[in-house]
Image (cartoon, helix red, strand yellow):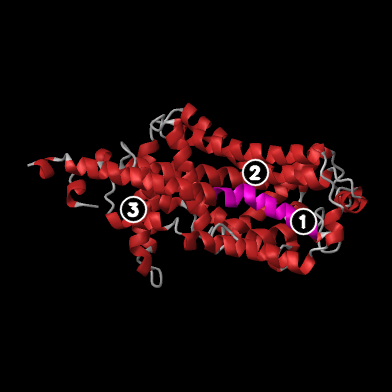
Amino acid sequence: MSDENKNQPLDNQQTDYSEKDYQNLLNSVSPWKIAIPIILGLGVVVYMFLTKFKAEEFAKISFQTHTYFWILMAGVFVCIRHLCYMTRLRIITEGHFSWWKCFELIVIWEFSSCITPSSVGGSAVSMFVISQEKGMTAPRTVMIILYTVVIDTFFFLTALLLFFLTFGPIMIYPGLTDISNIFGNVWTSAFAVAYLFMLSYGSLICYGVLVNAGAMRAILNFLGKLPLINRFKDTLANFGNDMVTASAELKGKGWKFHVGSILATMGAWMSRFMILNCLILAFVTFSDSPEVKNHYDSLFTAANGLELNVVEQQFFIYAREQAMYVLMAVSPTPGAAGAAELAFLSFHNDYMPDEKTNVTLATIIATVWRMFTFYSYLLFGAIVVPRWVSSVIATRNANAAGSPEKTA
């Protein structure tokens, strides 16, 4: 931050970024940066096709009217998800951004999540991007980012707990009927560790932003003085300051602000997972193949305590997807590329065709699912990001040319 900005009142401060920051974002749409997650994701898919694909099984897949309908509905939920995120951004900024600007910013936000490790996420890029928009002060930008983290985490973890109470441990992973066995294999162990991690940092941020930011800042500053952790003292101090800033910005916001933000968040998350639900409805739930249908129905039996109708089955599948997403959220690969495809086959093999029945169909569903939720944002981001950077730099240069320092 420049000395000039430091002397400004907090309400008017804007983060100062160099030309290098803009160039770094522009470099994110280089062919190589986009190619890395594509290679990782498609590499897993190609491997599965080379090792498991059976032409005779592919020939059994029946494309009927209901198949195309549910694939179309998956596309509709992609649009609804994006619209919900746009609506949330409009609400949190209290109408500061136009609908088109919200569309553009959400594309960049999602694109940044695709090219950075899921464990890192796109928040850092999002903070940079939002701060460059006219009228976006540093405190307001910090509030937007941290508040979205709070409501995302709150909804996600709460929904997962409610599903667990409804369906039991089996909603987490195939065959998990006793929660005491959650450390019984690699996948469930990873889920448990990832969930506890998300719960910990989510609770920390929720408390700091919504309850007592001052106390949380004091705790973080204290932790920064401890041996082994003191090398992160500056990071912890900055994080504590950010929570104080976000908390101050949120004071005085009415119930419509919070209710609207939460409802938009719920819509976005539900749409995210309904994409895969639609593809399972298209290829599995109503499949004409006795082999596929029997494998699907085998889960929803009295023996498993899951005698569910078609609608209830979709809630169960939705719950399983949320459990799977816990691992995707902490994946070290860009956009969970590769990890998502592998997790998909493992987490859904008790009702999805797997290598014991028909891994060909499962691979096709996984590929279409990732095309909707991952590769589409890589494509749109590659188009939107260069346009946005060019626009911001042009505005920045025009403002600099018209400033008193330049015209004097």
Q: Which residues are magenta?
A: 360-377
In percent of the image, x 62 and y 61: which residue is there?
Answer: 41
Q: Which mark is residue 22?
A: 3
User: Is the residue 189 above or below the residue 145 in the image?
Assistant: below
**Residues at discs 3 and 1 in contact (Cβ within 8 Å):** no
Q: Main secondary structure of the magenta part?
A: helix
Q: Position of residue 159 (x, y in %)?
A: 64, 43
Q: Check residue 370 for magenta coloring.
A: yes
| Cα distance between the residues tagged 2 and 1 | 26 Å
Q: Which mark is residue 362?
A: 1
Q: Image check: 357 left or right of 269?
A: right
Q: Image check: 79 left or right of 106?
A: right
Say which quadrant the C terminus sits in: top left
**Circle 1 SS class:** helix
Q: Which mark is residue 159?
A: 2
**Circle 2 SS class:** helix
